[in-house]
Image (spheres, grey):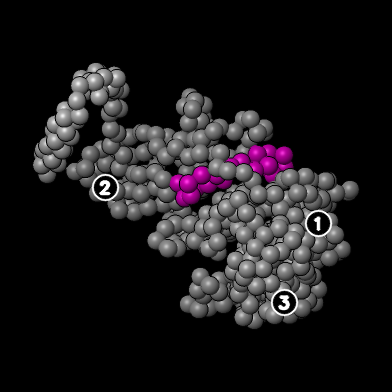
Amino acid sequence: MKRMAGLVLFVTLAVALAALADIGPGALADAPSPASHSRDAPTPAEDVFTPVTVSTVGPETIPVLGSDGQWHVVYELLLTNGKMAPATIQRIQVLDADDPDRVVADYAGDDVVERLRTLTPQPATDAVIEPNGGRFFYIELAFPRRDAVPEAVEHHLELLAASNPGATEPTPLNYTAARFSLRGGRLPVLGPPLRGTGWVAINGCCNPEIVHRGSIQTINGGYWDAQRFAIDWMRLDSEGRLVVGDPSDVENYVGYGSDVLAVADGIVVDVLDELPDQVPGELPDPATITTRTVDGNHVVLDIGGGYFVNYAHLKLGTIRVQPGDRVRRGQVIANLGNSGNTAAPHLHLHVTTGPEVLGSDGFPYIFRNFLLAGQAGDIAGSDDLTGNWVESRLDPPEPQRRRFPLNLNIVDFPD
């Protein structure tokens, strides 16, 4: 097969050269001869046998300044074992792609296992990838300064795997793969999605255990992590409570019914307003969930620059916009509810690089300004949402400008 392809190429070139010869003398005077061109061509690098392929979920990202003063980079790798021998991932190093001697992060042993997920995705029990199997690997980087962030990173793997296509027993290997740009556009700057004090950033950035981060979905023939930087906003009252009274009554939640605001000027591209509130504490039957209803009643807003804002779990009958409407930052577009795949009233908010709710790449963003008022306890890890959830308070709250709230931050938004 290869000889036939080479023969076709040779004949094609011969015909082309014969045609050029008819153009006349001098027509190619300034062009290098084929011989001199081949002498100047670089020697191709030797191919490396890589039994485990490495790719990123999403084409690129950009660092985001968190409320902790660190610049955060968050992304995932897809590792696929394409050979007959099992592959054991022993070490993954993140390297500065333009300075490979600079190791940005180094994961080995238990650290590797803790960051591996199956394709479902569920936490992996060990570092072994079975033949024809795959795993996700979750990476979070933090830098003290913006100029410390590399332009791009690569990934160096140390593993036990098949050393050739016919190997059935693993042997030690190491190689570098998957260049990934950290200069992927600009950060969207958002206004407040809600008003007032005591809003908690639940299921937020930045660690691999977060619910949103792990929600990689197979949509439209690909893997997407649309919710990579999603936040579930729930509200505390002055006594640190999320709910006052019976937690099964949606009306008893402090944030329920709050005005939801347009975070930027934009155009409404999608609306769903037909689902009732869930009874708190109960999730819908997974068999009934579709890509259309998983976020409940929702609004998708095109804010320009290739970025889209998704508002989810809105209250039935309160959405005040329709597709095609132009909205202004700060405009009330709906009220906070409990529709769709949710067990308690909250506003789910995330930004993507496409209009699809789940079939787009999740992108970081920053808020123009807010106040950091404290830190809440592990709300997402509890089945009982009653009681006081304030772990610590800042008095006075700290002004934050053009930053991203981190997981369980208590945030006050300007009225």
Task: Tell me where residue 218 appears, x and y as whole percent.
Answer: 44, 62
The answer to which of 237 and 25 lies nearer the viewer is 25
Is 143 above or below relative to 315? Answer: above
Q: Which residue is mark 2?
A: 83
Is 330 above or below relative to 64? Answer: below
Q: Residue at x 29, y 34 (%)?
A: 48
Query: Left or right: where does residue 387 sit relative to residue 356?
Result: right
Q: Secondary structure at mark 3?
A: loop
Look at label 2 and name its amino acid: Lys
Task: Tell me where residue 222 appears, x and y as whole percent.
Answer: 42, 58
User: Could you say which quadrant of the image residue 24 lies in?
Assistant: top left
Q: Residues within 10 Å of mark 2 (few under 14, many from 20)?
A: many
Q: Residue at x 29, y 48 (%)?
A: 82
Look at the numbered discs 3 and 1 and tell me whether their residues touch, using CB distance below 8 Å.
no
Q: Where's the C terminus, which quadrant?
A: bottom right
User: Could you say which quadrant of the image residue 119 lies in?
Assistant: bottom left
> In the rendered image, is residue 240 in sight?
no
The answer to which of 101 and 125 lies nearer the viewer is 101
Q: Is residue 232 magenta?
A: no
Q: Residue at x 25, y 23 (%)?
A: 28
User: Which one is in front in this view, the residue at disc 3 or the one at disc 2?
Assistant: 3
Q: Which residue is mark 1?
A: 413
Look at the numbered discs 1 and 2 and tell me whether their residues touch, using CB distance below 8 Å.
no
Query: Could you tell which of marks 3 and 1 lies nearer the N-terminus?
Result: 3
Q: Residue at x 71, y 57 (%)?
A: 264
Q: Secondary structure at mark 1?
A: strand
Task: Tell me where residue 363 appears, x and y as whole percent.
Answer: 58, 51
Query: Farthest front residue?
Result: 24
The numbered mark at residue 318 is: 3
Q: Residues within 10 Å of mark 1 (few under 14, many from 20)?
A: some
Query: Left or right: where does residue 354 sit relative to residue 376?
Result: left
Mark 3 → mark 1, Cα distance in angstroms: 22 Å
